[in-house]
Image (spheres, rainbow, N blue to C red):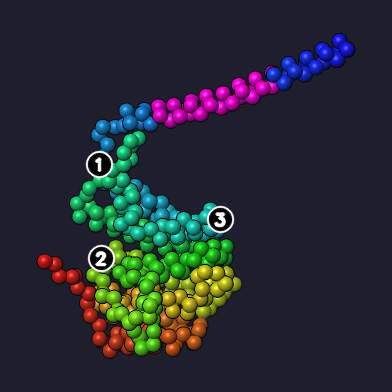
Amino acid sequence: DDDHNDKNKKDADGDVEMKDDEENHNNDDDDHDDDDMMAMDLGLAFLEATADPDMPPRTVQVEQALHMMDAILSLATAIASTPPGTAALSESGAVPALLATIRLQPEDAVQGLLRQSTTTTTTTTTVDSTTLYRLHTLVQYITAQSIQILETVVIAQPNASMAFTDLGGVAILTNRLAKELGNPPTLLTPSVGGELKDENQTNVAVVSPPPPPTYGQRVLLFSLVTCLTVVFHQEANPTNNGASANTESGSGTGSDQLRQPALTQAIITLLKHVPSYGGHLASLVATLLGDVLNHDPHVVRYVHEAGIAQAFFDMVQGKISFLRKPATD
């Protein structure tokens, strides 16, 4: 009996010790959390206290960061010029990163970079129109470089092509093209006769032409149309490198994309205003249309009904116009 009582007493003492250990462990966790928070606060306070008072303005920092991104993409362009380089970029997840860059609008990118955060507040730096234009142009050049790298990697690497298709790359490119041309594509659908209708099937006028393109927009538009032309050409002439589009995913075929209001209105806008956008861009658009029509002749009827064919014939006959800046009061 005495041995049994001693054993029960030892078990009870062991349970008490285990509970004490658990409580001590929980207290240690709380202490670690408090220490981490204190360390973070001290670190932020140290950064603010030791910040160089002669740091350049926020706009200069943003411009330097954009130049750095431009230099990195220039290096990536050189890397993508070799087969091992395209393979390395594909395996490192370059396609999703490049598509995210292409999707980002210059205005949103610049405003996000100009926000200056501290431990308590977030402010946006006010800049003059000239500086803002320069920053927007840098973002457009960076986006154009991203498109060129994406085109090279997608054409050369089957894995990159599959990732591009799975992520809806063609749709991202066409939507970006429509936005750069100032066309809101989401509410417009083509109908018989070349008119455009909204979701309620009420006839609406074709959207007004956009303002003349800037130099940065010209470069970006050229990259967008070139990439789409190459992708659709690979689809119409598939090769063993796997670069042709996978029609089972969200991107669809070239004819499917051509039926989307975004690409339809973009092509019409480019063909109607060749003097403003340049003959080289119109030539790329004609090549794109030729590849899509050759791959899927059933889309010919849509091309006539949506007004694409008429815009092309007007361009051939010289019935084209310059884009002009809107009148201001």
Q: Quadrant of the C terminus?
A: bottom left
Q: Kindly identify the amino acid type of the residue bearing the numbered disc 3.
A: Glu
Q: Quadrant of the N terminus?
A: top right
- Dot 3 and dot 2 residues touching (CB under 8 Å): no
Residue 2 versus residue 192 in the image, above or below: above
Q: Kindly identify the amino acid type of the residue bearing the numbered disc 2.
A: Thr
Residue 174 lies in the magenta stretch: no
Given the current orientation, which residue lies at the most extreme left position?
A: 329
Q: Which quadrant of the view contains residue 281?
A: bottom left
According to the picture, the residue beneath numbered tag 1 turns out to be: 57
The answer to whether residue 77 is seen in the rendering is no
According to the picture, the residue beneath numbered tag 3 turns out to be: 91
Residue 17 vs residue 227, the one in the foreground: 17
Q: Which quadrant of the view contains residue 224?
A: bottom left
Residue 260 x/y as whole percent: 42, 76
According to the picture, the residue beneath numbered tag 2 turns out to be: 214
Mark 3 → mark 1, Cα distance in angstroms: 38 Å
The residues colored magenta run 17-43
For label 3, the SS is helix
